[in-house]
Amino acid sequence: MIANFIDGPLWYVSLAVFFIGVLWKLATIVFGKKTTDLSQPRASAAVGAWRTIFSRFLPDRGMFSEIKLQVIAGYLFHLGLLALMFFAAPHIRFLDEHFLGFSWSALPHWAFIVAAQFAFLGLILLWLQRLLNPVTKLISTAGDHISTLLTFVVMLTGCLALLESFSGLRLIHRFSVEIFLIYFPFSRLMHAFTFIPSRAFTGAWFGRRGIRS
Amino acid sequence: MSARLEQGVEALKGQIDAKVNSFFTSCIHCGICAEACLFYTETKDPRYTPIYKTEPLRKVWKSEKTLLGKLGLAKALKEEDLADWEELVYDGCTACGRCSMVCPVGIDVADMIYRVKQGLEASGYSPQDLVAAADRALEFGSPMGDISHALKAQVKHIEKDTGLKVPFDVEGADYMVTISANEIVTYPDYIASLSQIFHQAGVSWTISSEAFQATNAGLQLGDNTIATKLVQRIVDAAEKLKVKYVVSPECGHAYAAIRWNGPNYIGRDYKFKVLHILELLDELYRDGRLKTSGMDASKLTFHDPCQLVRRGGVDAEPRELLGSVAENVIEMKEHGKMNWCCGGGGGVSAIERTEDLRVTVFNRKKSQLDELDVETVVTACSNCRAMLEDGLYANDMDMPVVGLTEMIAEHLVDDKPIPQMPDKTSDIKDAPSQKLEVEDTLPSSKVDETHVARSDDDKTSAEKTQQKKNTPASPQSLYDTPKYHQADNKSVDGSTFAPDKKSTRIDPEIISQKQLVKDDNLKKIEGIGPKIESLLKDAGLKTFADVKHASRDEIKAILDEAGPRYRMHEPKSWPSQAELADKGAWEELSKLQDHLMGGRE
């Protein structure tokens, strides 16, 4: 019965909360209160916005030595997670059957293991940094820890399910994903989407002043 | 909820828009912004982490814009928070915006901190020093009080020394120049330099006696009502005089206030354009109207004022101008849009209690300068200049700080005759308030004739010949191509900006003389800049001992001979300053210089 609930109603509820929540949140940003800058621009705001959306994928070179842990761990985690999400064979099969109607090549087993190790290593390093570094310790909120913990659980149960250590793990993984999806729109996990308008706002501000940010 | 808290919360609620919503939703609390902030890097106090300074705004945002807040489960902003954050935000942030350049999710943290300031100011949690400065600016026109008398005195000196009239309230002039209070009181040579440069370049300009002061204490305080009133004064004056351009002074935040924030304050675009003085000088230089001669050979670097470069976009202009008069410019490792702040911007320098903190955070600039081993720092903001001087003094660093406009003026080519001054020069009456009253302001036609120099094409051949004769043998003759071209000199960390060496022809005799004689750095003497130092050394006054033994009249004769641009300088205090420098009595010299104004007694 619990299995039916997790595979059935809870799955659809979590998807609905996720999609409606994310769209609602993005709408509050896209259609939210904005002020028009009346000063004469020196250069194009739009060009600045597009530039910054992409330029911030790379850290400032001069600061790299001070922030290398966040940068390297951040890339390990995000790239590893993306690989697991979109190139693990069960995920491709799931997306094909339930949403997309087409599939693509999955990662070979060894690559999956490497991606998982990258993702775990990155996440654990970032979490340790959050807990131990005086700056991140001060500025982190309960929400940051909950987001990290949920992501960790989703990844862990996912890997265990894939390795098929026991059959109930698939159900546990799905349940953790559902909790993750429900929590997502109300948390900073939203940065996965809102980093784009954030960078665009700042890039436009700098862009109209003729500054490459 | 107390009335103060309510006012603060309401003001902060008013700051929440799509941008703030996006920023707070995106912030992952990675702490990278801390490493970009000199208050954190130099103190290692995590409270100075830029995003942490926005905490009052985040709390209000969370209450207003998140599910937890809607359910009443978010922590509400308390009055203690406002009290705690006052010092953190006003004392521990210069609004330099370096944090905004490094945030991986693109948050403009500096903008958010400015929004917090508005909440703090609305609730009455703002530093008394800044409040008083803003009040003085509203009442008297300047954060320093009524400085119209100081301007009057400076203008009289300048007109007497340069032979050039400083034009006030000239309707229809092309450019209305604004000045910072600091330039009037501490760096008056700036105004003289403008007068000389504009004369040579044939610029039609004026100063408004109703709005000559450009700094904006309202912006520093976070009070948009005051900021708007101060901008409105300049706008009204500019539109009354029907000028085409308003020129912002060598002051970073004044530029931000009038150029970028101003139209948003007053709710409309201007009927004129705004240029920073360096943008105008660069335009004149590129048009060939600003002609310089000679290259400063000393090792120097440029300190980028944050509001001008990182937040204002005036980055290439100072480098091009500096490259036109200096051949040994070395960039700091982090320069341009990533330069480190002087530690006193954004109103921090106006808050007395920040003195120790400013000295601490200046360590970052000190390290940058130590790496370069330069002799001089050039900058283009009077506040940066004062902060650099304070920081260098506090660290026993023996290094003059020079304003770029003044440096350009020292290298002007003498190819324009000084017009006959009218019997009565700009006679500014004693002003009871902020408004300067100018007596005998010349009618526009006369001003145009007197002050707007004609272009070379307009001159008669006799004038041109005379001009050629009058032009002293200047160091320009040593160079075939003295101008620096940005495109040819790429900005590389620690690299030297220099004109194309292949195209320079330097007199070998002069090189050998320079190598053999061990000179003193005469720029330690207040009133002596790079060009005058070179004049004195060419005349044989190479050391402090030489200058201390020279009489005032002997030095004056050297200046007079060098041309009208140098006649304005009064060297009376130079021998006594040189005597102290020669003895190594730097503290006494500094005390003496505190009583001098641009080297004058």
Image: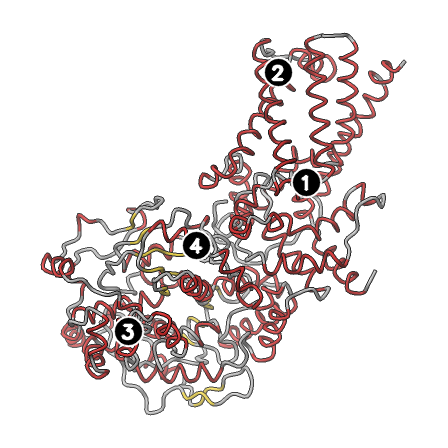
Q: Position of residue B142 (x, y in %)?
A: 54, 76
Q: Residue at x 46, y 64 (%)?
A: B387
Which residue position holds label 2?
A87
Mark 1 → mark 4, Cα distance in angstroms: 30 Å
Q: Which residue is more in the foreground, A18 or B531? A: B531
Q: Residues within 10 Å of mark 1 (few under 14, many from 20)?
A: some
Secondary structure at badge 3 equals loop
Assess whether mark 2 and mark 4 are in contact (beta carbons under 8 angstroms): no
- Give the distance between the C-alpha atoms of the residues marked 4 and 2, in whole angstroms: 49 Å
Circle 1 SS class: loop
The dot on residue B454 is 3
Under mark 2, the amino acid is Phe
Asked whether the beta carbons under mark 1 and mark 3 sit within 8 Å of each other, the answer is: no
Residues flagged by tags 2 and 1 on a common chain? yes
Q: Chain of mark 2?
A: A
Of the pair A182 and B94, the residue shown nearer to us: B94
Q: Quadrant of the N terminus of chain B?
A: bottom right
Chain identifier of the residue bearing label 4 in the image: B
- Characterize the local packing of mark 4: few (<14), some (14-19) or many (20 or more) Cα atoms within 10 angstroms: many
The CA distance from mark 2 to mark 3 is 73 Å
- In the image, B56 versus B567, the foreground residue is B56
Q: Is residue A48 above or below residue A123?
A: below
Q: CA distance from mark 2 to mark 1?
A: 31 Å
Mark 1 or 3: in front is 1
Residue at mark 1: A140
Q: Is residue A112 left or right of residue A97?
A: left
